[in-house]
Image: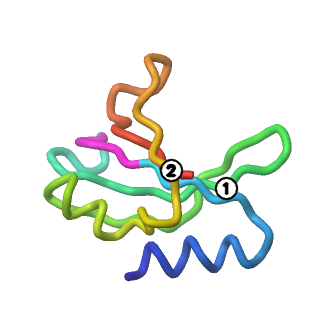
């Protein structure tokens, strides 16, 4: 799966990737989007890597869930955020 491969490629380069799942963001209403972000000291940056699915279950099939921990949306998060995987 493309998202899993990109996640692993970023990890192998020493980055700390985070996969954040969104539902119905402005750029893709009515769909689930998973985007990879990388964490560097003092900042978090979006990457160009993302995938789209119709359901949350279908989206999770693109995420290496057996290797990561799921964090539910925090009250401070954008309302479109569903969960993040670290």
Instruction: State the residue at coordinates (38%, 82%).
Output: 1
Residue 38 as seen in the image, left or right of residue 23: right
List the single residue furthest toward the right.
41
Query: Dividing the picture into quarters, in which one does residue 54 lie?
Result: bottom left
Residue 69 as seen in the image, left or right of residue 21: right
User: Does dot 1 land on a helix, a strand or a loop?
Assistant: strand
Residue 3 spot, x, y in % from top left? 44, 73
List the single residue furthest toward the front.
66
Instruction: State the residue at coordinates (54%, 76%).
Output: 6
The disc placed on residue 61 is none
Residue 56 spot, x, y in % from top left? 21, 52
The disc placed on residue 69 is 2
Most common SS among magenta residues? strand
Region rendered in magenta? 21-25
- What number of labels is visible? 2
What residue is disc 1 on?
38
Instruction: State the residue at coordinates (29%, 40%).
Output: 26
List the single residue furthest toward the top.
75
Does residue 37 show up magenta in the picture? no
Instruction: State the residue at coordinates (31%, 48%).
Output: 27
Q: Nearer the viewer, residue 28 or 71?
A: 71
Residue 54 as seen in the image, left or right of residue 32: left
Q: Nearer the viewer, residue 24 or 21?
A: 21
């Amino acid at each position: 799966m493309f998202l899993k491969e990109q996640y692993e490629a970023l990890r192998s380069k020493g980055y700390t990737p985070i996969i954040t799942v969104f539902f119905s963001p402005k750029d893709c209403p009515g769909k689930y989007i998973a985007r990879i972000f990388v964490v560097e000291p003092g900042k978090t940056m979006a990457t160009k890597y993302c995938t789209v699915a119709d359901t949350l279950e279908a989206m999770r099939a693109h995420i290496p869930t057996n290797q990561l921990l799921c964090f539910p949306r925090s009250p401070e998060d954008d309302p479109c955020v569903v969960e993040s995987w670290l």
